[in-house]
Image (cartoon, rainbow, N blue to C red):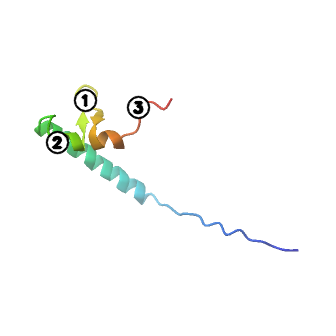
Amino acid sequence: MQKASLPIKLLYTSHLPVIITVAYLLVIYWSSQMLQLFFTKNSILVSICGQWSEVEMRPVGGLAYFLSPPDKWY
């Protein structure tokens, strides 16, 4: 009788990468909202970091838009 073992390596991930990712997204969202508040919408810095709609407070452009989850999943 032969006994074979399969070399399956499992990747252990903890909760720390998720917390760090959420913290980075929070900093990007918060800083882009503050930049839009203090500068004009035509500023290059605002257009790169993120533009926000004033009615729904959703990102509509920039880095904040590309890092935000999609609105609809269907």
Give the side of residue 20 with respect to residue 62, left or right.
Answer: right
**Label of residue 71 in the image:** 3
Residue at which label 1 appears: 53
Residue 33 percent location from the top left of the image: 21, 39
Which one is in front in this view, the residue at disc 2 or the one at disc 1?
Answer: 2
Query: Which residue extends farthest top?
Result: 55
Residue at 28%, 36% in the rendered image: 61
Tell me the quadrant of the picture where the N terminus can be found.
Answer: bottom right
- Which secondary structure, mark 3? loop
Residue at 29%, 44% in the rendered image: 63
Residue at which label 2 appears: 44
Q: Amino acid at mark 2?
A: Ile
Residue at 11%, 38% in the rendered image: 39
Q: CB of mark 2 within 8 Å of CB of mark 3? A: no
Mark before the other along the chain sequence, 2 or 1: 2
Say above or below: 29 vs 59. Answer: below
Residues 2 and 62: in front is: 62
What is the spatial separation of the Cα atoms under label 1 and label 3, in whole angstroms? 14 Å
Q: Amino acid at mark 3?
A: Asp
Say above or below: 11 vs 49. Answer: below
Residue at 14%, 39% in the rendered image: 43
- Which secondary structure, mark 1? loop
What is the spatial separation of the Cα atoms under label 2 and label 3, in whole angstroms? 26 Å
Q: Residues within 10 Å of mark 1 (few under 14, many from 20)?
A: few
Q: Residues within 10 Å of mark 2 (few under 14, many from 20)?
A: few
